[in-house]
Image: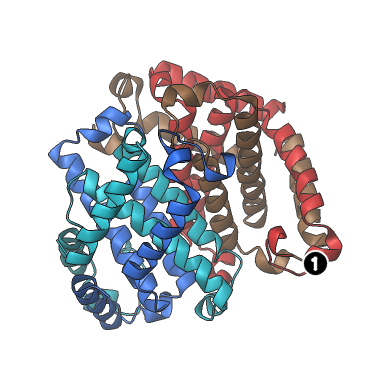
Chain colours: A brown, B red, C cyan, D blue
Amino acid sequence: MDNEIEALRLVIRQFAEDRDWDQFHSPKNLASALMVEAGELLEQFQWLTEEQSKCLSDTQKDKVKDEIADVFIYLIRLADKLEIDLIAAARHKITINAQKYPVAKARGSNKKYTDF
Amino acid sequence: MDNEIEALRLVIRQFAEDRDWDQFHSPKNLASALMVEAGELLEQFQWLTEEQSKCLSDTQKDKVKDEIADVFIYLIRLADKLEIDLIAAARHKITINAQKYPVAKARGSNKKYTDF
Amino acid sequence: MDNEIEALRLVIRQFAEDRDWDQFHSPKNLASALMVEAGELLEQFQWLTEEQSKCLSDTQKDKVKDEIADVFIYLIRLADKLEIDLIAAARHKITINAQKYPVAKARGSNKKYTDF
Amino acid sequence: MDNEIEALRLVIRQFAEDRDWDQFHSPKNLASALMVEAGELLEQFQWLTEEQSKCLSDTQKDKVKDEIADVFIYLIRLADKLEIDLIAAARHKITINAQKYPVAKARGSNKKYTDF
């Protein structure tokens, strides 16, 4: 586990404890909350073109940053509750993805691996 | 920026470059992809009770771990594209949340701050 | 196509035309917008228990009703753009679901058909 | 309530009763399930350009049709559980939207009403 994520994990845990929110933080509810925040993130982009999404104004970028942060906070909290190491899980999944999407087949393609 | 996240950021960036996927990775598309993965994560919990979501079988937990990893990977990729520091953004947002949800008002409550 | 949905389809189409919003209403964007509204719907339930979600206050129910309406509006709009008949599509899918989830296997089970 | 939606509502209700799924169909869970299906719908579009999303192949369109149907089925089911009339709710919301987005202000704009 990473030092900075580990520090955040403890801050977020304390935040919930201070407010007696543990009762609401079942993995099921945290997965819902993460999804809701992911929706608020997507909302920032829904009517933009792809090009516009690459050149956000400062105001747009600040909103996006806050929504990204919310997703990250719930991701850390959910991983904490399930005793999952985020960094190790990501490293493992990248290895799997590399097998699903070998460079020779996936290069320049937007197809799902099941459609190769 | 954190050392382990920084290392992941570079691995994920290389993964996309090797496959010439940069053309698909506009912030708009990455926000959609993150949302789709958040849906696959929620799918694991949708018919479970809150109690069941706290006691996953090994098979269930492995699936959840992979979906959490997918969300994390797209979060890192999106933050990379927008030059957002995930750790700093989360720390900043926690400060804002502490103001929105002061302990005295938020204790034991599942209300949104706008409904206090 | 159903008379009442057909009438709504035309109202929603006119609404977009009056505002020159057709330029934003690609199927890709409408699918994102639908997702964002589905997130706002889920937000109403995220911290409630299942029991609480069955006994909403009038205020809660009004909010839920508006979010359900938003999802429905985008669903009709997306189906209009893709020339999909919602009623026929639902009838077709229910037939498929009946094959995936035969009563004998699915009775009382919350498992996905791929896990039977 | 509309005749065709009313007929679907009863078919979907019977489908759940036959499988003893009422126990899983709390509004909270149905809102999650709707969200998961909305994610599967969005997945069909996530790497397409807006232009590509307007010219789906027959195979792509069939997949999209099934996902749209799934969203619609859960929407009908959720509305049934909460005794909400989908058609009336949509008509009511369109009236509200017309006030939020008057033609003079909203014409050709992709801004949210709060940002006018």
Q: Could you tell me the amino acid type at mark 1?
A: Arg
Picture quadrant of residue C102: bottom left
**Quarter of the rendering occupied by the N terminus of chain D:** bottom left
Question: Could you say which is closer to the camera, residue D27 or residue B38?
Answer: D27
Q: Is residue D32 visible?
A: no
The location of residue D62, given as percent across then percent down, is 17, 47
x, y percent for residue A35: 52, 51
Query: How would you rate the neighbour count of disc 1 (Cα within 10 Å): few for under 14, some for 14-19, many for 20 or more?
Result: some
Image-quadrant location for residue B88: top right
Q: Indicate left or right for D53 with B113 as reference.
A: left
- Which chain does the numbered disc 1 sit on? B
Residue drawn where x is 73% and y is 69% of the image: B109
Task: Name the image quarter holding the C terminus of chain D.
Answer: top right
Residue in the picture at 52% in, 42% down:
D112
Q: Residue at x 35, y 78 (%)?
A: D21
Residue B65 in percent (x, y) is at 53, 48
Above or below for A39 versus C107: above
What residue does disc 1 label?
B107
Q: Quadrant of residue B104?
A: bottom right
> Helix or strand or loop: what does disc 1 sit on?
loop
- Whether residue C33 is situated above or below residue C58 in the rendered picture: above
Above-or-below relation of A5 to D63 = above
Measuring 40% from the left and 43% from the top, which residue is drawn there? C32
Residue B53 seen: yes
Give the farthest residue toward the right. B104
D86 relative to A30, above or below = below
Image location (x, y in percent) of residue D77: 34, 72
Q: Is residue D59 left or right of residue B33?
A: left
Image side of residue B12 versus residue A64, left or right: left
